[in-house]
Image (cartoon, helix red, strand yellow):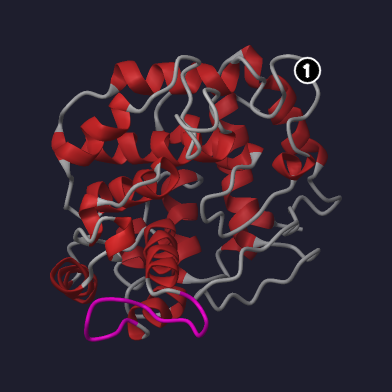
Amino acid sequence: MNVVAWLLEGDPAVRWQVKRDLLGGDGADEERARVGREGVGARILARQGADGAWQREGEPDWLPTLFAMQMLRATGADPAAPEVAAAVERLARGFRWHEELGGRPFFEGETEPCINGGALALGGYFGRPDAALAQRLIGEQLGDGGWNCEAPQQSSRGSYHSTICVLEGLLEYERASGASTAGARRRGEAYLLERGMFRRRSTGEPADPRFLELAFPTRYCYDVLRGLDYLRAAGAAPDERAADAIRAIEARRRSDGRWSLDAAREDVWDGDERLGEPSRWITLRALRVLRWYGI
């Protein structure tokens, strides 16, 4: 089948990234302008409360708020679009992390590196970069180059989950502010690459079999596609240490050229994709990672 044509039948959030990343950019701006008004982007924005937060029964408001904003960033919604800018302003003015998490405004973050990496990425992407949060995260980098939400009380070793969240945050902060975080990012990238993007450094075995499952949305969870897509977005040169991870992505391609959704992180995203079925989000991200790697 024509996989690109199938991708272009999807949500505006998928279509514009296909045009930008796979088709040279022609028509991408027009598609991006639809993201906040149609499809998943519009549904996310419509669910925001007047206080700037998102709500989900049985959960503290910070969880669905964080996940909604992460999904909005994944759509590539234009921060300058009026409907997006208004949502960001409501969040900045109205939301506060709970007192046990510091009680600060959303874009100033809370206490854990994995959550703060997400807050920093969102602040950078949506035009609210926070220098103090970036410096805090850089100061929390561990000796092995990674980050861990359990450090320093319980672990001196990095975590794949925390590390990818912080790396994405530092990259978005750098883009928004112009301040260099390259030293910390390079050490964090080395943490991933020295482990082949999914292995234990000590034994070479997969650190977690779920790292080889392709999930969307990712929330604060790591998988090889998320790690590789970060390296692509950061402009890193293809590295032979990522070769096994690339082969793992290739191995999951279906006979029709598409990729399936292996795992789903339930949140305020109302997707039309189902576990085990072809996923436009996974297929888009896999194709652009393989293109970056020269395949």
Which x, y percent locates residue 8? 55, 64
Residue at the (64%, 13%) spot, across then down: 240
Give the quarter of the figure containing the N terminus.
bottom right
Q: Which residue is mark 1?
A: 204
Closer to the camera, 215 or 34?
Answer: 215
Q: Which residues are magenta?
A: 48-59
Which x, y percent locates residue 127? 17, 53
Q: How many marks?
A: 1
Q: Main secondary structure of the magenta part?
A: loop
Residues packed near mark 1 inside 10 Å, few (<14), some (14 to 19) or many (20 plus): few
Residue at the (54%, 72%) spot, across then down: 267
Residue at the extreme right: 255
Image quarter for residue 157? top right
Which x, y percent locates residue 62? 37, 68
Would residue 26 be found to the left or right of residue 273 on screen? left
Would residue 119 be found to the left or right of residue 209 on screen? left
Image quarter for residue 251? top right
Q: In terms of secondary structure, where does tag 1 sit? A: loop
Residue at the (42%, 44%) spot, across then down: 24
